[in-house]
Amino acid sequence: DAGITQSPRYKITETGRQVTLMCHQTWSHSYMFWYRQDLGHGLRLIYYSAAADITDKGEVPDGYVVSRSKTENFPLTLESATRSQTSVYFCASSFSRGLEAFFGQGTRLTVV
Amino acid sequence: AQTVTQSQPEMSVQEAETVTLSCTYDTSESDYYLFWYKQPPSRQMILVIRQEAYKQQNATENRFSVNFQKAAKSFSLKISDSQLGDAAMYFCAYRSAGLGSSNTGKLIFGQGTTLQVKP
C-alpha cells in the first residue's frame, strides 16, 4: 500500500524490555521524523532524519535509538523501556522542507 | 533553538461562528515555513494550511485563513463558519527552510489547542 505505515498500532511491554516501532514510507521522501504525543505537551520531536544514514536528535531523544539504512524505513527503538515512555508515537515523512509532512496512524505504546 | 507556543489549551465556538486560534514562535532564522495541522479523534494528522515566511500575503484555504505577523512572530488560524466537523485538536508547526549546515529541516510543533464546536 502506498503511504506511510507504522507498526504495530498498539503495543504493551514491560519495564526494561527493548521494543522497536517500525515506520515505512513508499514515497522515497528524504525527511522522516519520530514524535511522541502526550497530554499537555503536544507533539515532541524525538529524532529526525534528512536522508538515509543521516539522523539527528530532536527535543526528547534520551532512551531512544534510531537508524536509517534505507530511505523508506526509519525504526525507533526503546533500548530499555520505562513507564515514562508510555505515549502515542507518530512517524512522519516529507519530500522537502517546504512541503507538508505526512503522518502515520500512530502507535500507542504502554509500558507496564 | 526554535520554539512554538500555543497558549490556548482549549477553545470553543458556536456552530457557524468564527474562531481564532493563537500561535507564536521564536526563531532567529529569516527563512522558514509555518503550518497548521488538525488532529480529529481518529488521531490522523491533517494539514490545514501552510505559509511561507517570505510571503507577506496571508494564506487562505476555503474557511481557513491565517494572520501571519512576521515581526511579531505570530501565526494565528481563523476558522470561519465553524462546522461540527472542525472539532479537533489543532497544532501549529514551524519548519526551517534554510540550506545552511545547521538547518536540517527539523519540524517542530506547539502544544496544541483543542477546539470544541457547539451545535
Image (cartoon, rainbow, N blue to C red):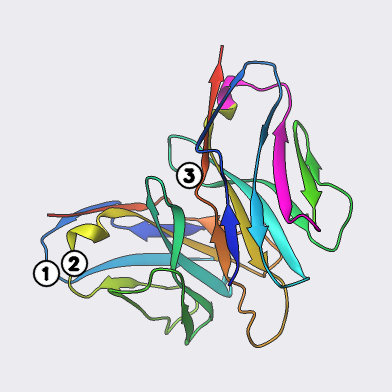
Does residue A100 show up? Answer: no
The percent coordinates of residue B115 (x first, y second) are: 54, 30
Which residues, given as a range, are shown in magenta? B71-85
Q: Chain of mark 3?
A: B
Q: Chain of mark 1?
A: A
What quarter of the picture does the N terminus of chain B occupy?
bottom right
Label 1 Cα neighbours within 10 Å, binned few <14 / some 14-19 / many ≥20 = some
What quarter of the picture does the C terminus of chain B occupy?
top right
Q: Secondary structure at mark 3?
A: loop
Residue holding disc 3: B44
- In whole angstroms, how far apart are the C-alphas of marks 1 and 3? 30 Å
Q: Nearer the viewer, residue A96 or B6?
A: B6
Count of all numbered marks drawn on residues in the image: 3
**Nearest-to-viewer mark from 2 and 3:** 2
Residue holding disc 1: A16
Q: Quadrant of residue B79?
A: top right
- Marks 2 and 1 in Cβ contact (< 8 Å): yes
- Marks 1 and 3 in Cβ contact (< 8 Å): no
Do circles 2 and 3 both sit on a common chain? Answer: no
